[in-house]
Image: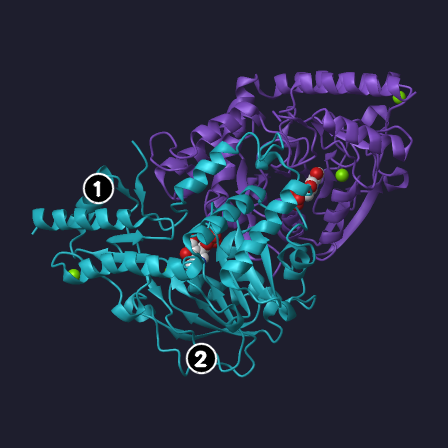
Chain colours: A purple, B cyan
Amino acid sequence: MGRVYNFSAGPAVLPEEVLKEAAEEMLDYKGTGMSVMEMSHRSKAFQEILDDAQADLRELLHIPDNYKVLFLQGGAHQQFAMIPMNLMKHKVADYIVTGQWAKRAYQEAQKYGKANKIASSEDKTFSYIPDCSDLPVSDDADYVYICENNTIYGTKFKTLPNTKGKLLVADVSSCFLSEPMDVSKYGVIYGGVQKNVGPAGMVITIIREDLITEDVLPGTPTMLTYKTHADAGSLYNTPNCYCIYMCGKVFKWLKKQGGLEAMKQYNEKKAKILYDFLDGSSLFRGTVVPEDRSLMNVPFVTGSDELDARFIKEAAAQGFVNLKGHRSVGGMRASIYNAMPIEGVEKLVEFMKKFEEENR
Amino acid sequence: MGRVYNFSAGPAVLPEEVLKEAAEEMLDYKGTGMSVMEMSHRSKAFQEILDDAQADLRELLHIPDNYKVLFLQGGAHQQFAMIPMNLMKHKVADYIVTGQWAKRAYQEAQKYGKANKIASSEDKTFSYIPDCSDLPVSDDADYVYICENNTIYGTKFKTLPNTKGKLLVADVSSCFLSEPMDVSKYGVIYGGVQKNVGPAGMVITIIREDLITEDVLPGTPTMLTYKTHADAGSLYNTPNCYCIYMCGKVFKWLKKQGGLEAMKQYNEKKAKILYDFLDGSSLFRGTVVPEDRSLMNVPFVTGSDELDARFIKEAAAQGFVNLKGHRSVGGMRASIYNAMPIEGVEKLVEFMKKFEEENR
Ligand SMILES: Cc1ncc(COP(=O)(O)O)c(C=O)c1O
Ligand SMILES: Cc1ncc(COP(=O)(O)O)c(C=O)c1O
Ligand SMILES: [Mg+2]
Ligand SMILES: [Mg+2]
Ligand SMILES: [Mg+2]
Ligand SMILES: [Mg+2]
């Protein structure tokens, strides 16, 4: 078949023109006579790829000068450990648990100190974001941790929690670069790139310079110390070079689309088409309270497991793939990241209408 | 220009037909309508890629059933920490230091217990492999560690050390799949793939099952525990999917070449051309004692920094690139991994002859 509409939650759809460029450059990157995959990470050509990627990311997010950008391996899960190992100076941290990934991070932190769950939405299958305006933030907390967009459950923090002066640390894996953000409000922002930015195998960590210290927990591996990578400009050891190259291409594509302000408008428009349909539909409904709905991940159900299964199957046959919801929510989930074109959402909704008519 | 002869020590040359296939499949992998980069790591299509890669690697190396194969992130450097964190049950390990990478591993291990340097070749810039037939292996050593092929210095263990019954752990990053090996002689074998196997961003660890335990050092991150990845078939979290796919293609390519027995013959033939020339040359000479010479990394010098620099520059202009030696050795280094065709070595030697004539 031709290209499908891929609603995968991650790894996920990438811009077609980026993939085309990568294919064209596969055997010879810009006259170097080699693939980027074959390039020494210490070469001039690769250093330019890395520098450009970093500069474009800084421009897109307006990253202040006192923040470092690190390209790291190990995925988001490795950050679940790196964050406490590097930041838990007083061995206390507060976690707001709004989904499975925040929960995993919270559990990992317990290895390293006192991790407090100061709020949770687990009572209602994480279908909302708790009120975080006046939480019992610990006096001696080294940071307050959130997962800003909850990939599985389709919720998003629309306002950041009141951390009462404590450092804010955020996992933005599934909303990274989907809209502008004020980096200065955070101590650490990190995202696995495999949802909205590039192929799997890398996480980008944006960290305020004063948090990069040698004063880490005893036994922290050199590779899990932020300072190691910050001091070496993400070249302490061989990074995921090809992923940096692909992310760099996506950054340039985002700039061409008009940057993150334009992406936000586009993503809002796309999400509205789907949410409006869900709200009007008598067969389908969204599972998240309207005020906390994610622009990126849209879970929905019919209420019948049998109908859900039939929908997923028939949709796939029409080229709308990876619509199965996470097992903890059931039903369907459409992830509509930056690279999902508006036509994909429009056509999905058309198909849903047809399915609804045929199954009322 | 067209494709160059790329003598980079890593990331390094890949088989051209593998790159061509990857380019062709970039927008649509086998009728899935998507790139492998866009594929959920939980999808059937990706699971097949992973299973195939593992099966082919097992076949190539004749890996016994009681060993697990893990596809991990973080590069070789992360193994420097994972090995002691997972294996140092008695907090004692013996290291044979034959180069910078073994030294780094030795230093990292010191964070976790008593790491003993039981042999070293640092006295002569690591230009040889010490006699390891009767070393003072510690009674309570949890393992003996070697770097089997020393990328920077161009030495290789031709016989494995006598570990006096202790577990052998080997970094094979720069000789991985260059020739057959008897996996059963090792407790753990690992290699960063970016030299002889695939693009950067992954390490393959082959580990005997009884060594995979929950009994790791306190504070070992979940992601740095072998058991985490072994239990989940390398899918505990999102792996470097595209790298697994590329390595899988290289494994198939190796099988087509006749497997590792055939590769060994081919690599010996290639290396002999270069070493024979170096031994006969009055201008160039290899820096390693003949009996410990690597088949993969061939360092050589003229004896004059000025001539070395001129050689590197003129070679690059003729399409022989990345011949500069590591700063700790100086001179030149030709890395002639599996994917370097014999023509590349023949033409390099022709060029060296010409250079010698012009500069006697
Ligand atoms: C928000 C979020 N955090 C963390 C993860 C885990 O990422 P990784 O697989 O890179 O460890 C995911 C998704 O898989 C996610 O959606
Ligand atoms: C033998 C050996 N071990 C370890 C390393 C370090 O690998 P990495 O950059 O993946 O950490 C290298 C090369 O860079 C190497 O050649
Ligand atoms: Mg979630
Ligand atoms: Mg409805
Ligand atoms: Mg070395
Ligand atoms: Mg000579």
Image-based side of A143 in relation to B71, left or right: right
Q: Is residue B321 left or right of residue A234?
A: left
Residue at x-position 83% and y-position 17%: A353
Amino acid type at image mark 2: Asn
Mark 2 or mark 1, which is nearer the start of the sequence?
2
Task: Provide residue A259's location: percent of width, then percent of height.
Answer: 57, 20
Give the quadrant of the C terminus of chain A: top right
Q: Secondary structure at mark 1?
A: helix
Residue kind at label 1, given as amino acid type: Lys
Q: Which of pointers 1 and 2 indicates the residue nearer the eye?
A: 2
**Would you name the residue on which mark 2 appears?**
B162
The location of residue A4, given as percent across then percent down, is 65, 26
Q: Residue at x 62, y 51 (%)?
A: B51
Give the vertical position of A41 relative to A156 (above or below).
below
Looking at the rendered image, the quarter that the N terminus of chain A falls into is top right
Tag 2 secondary structure? loop
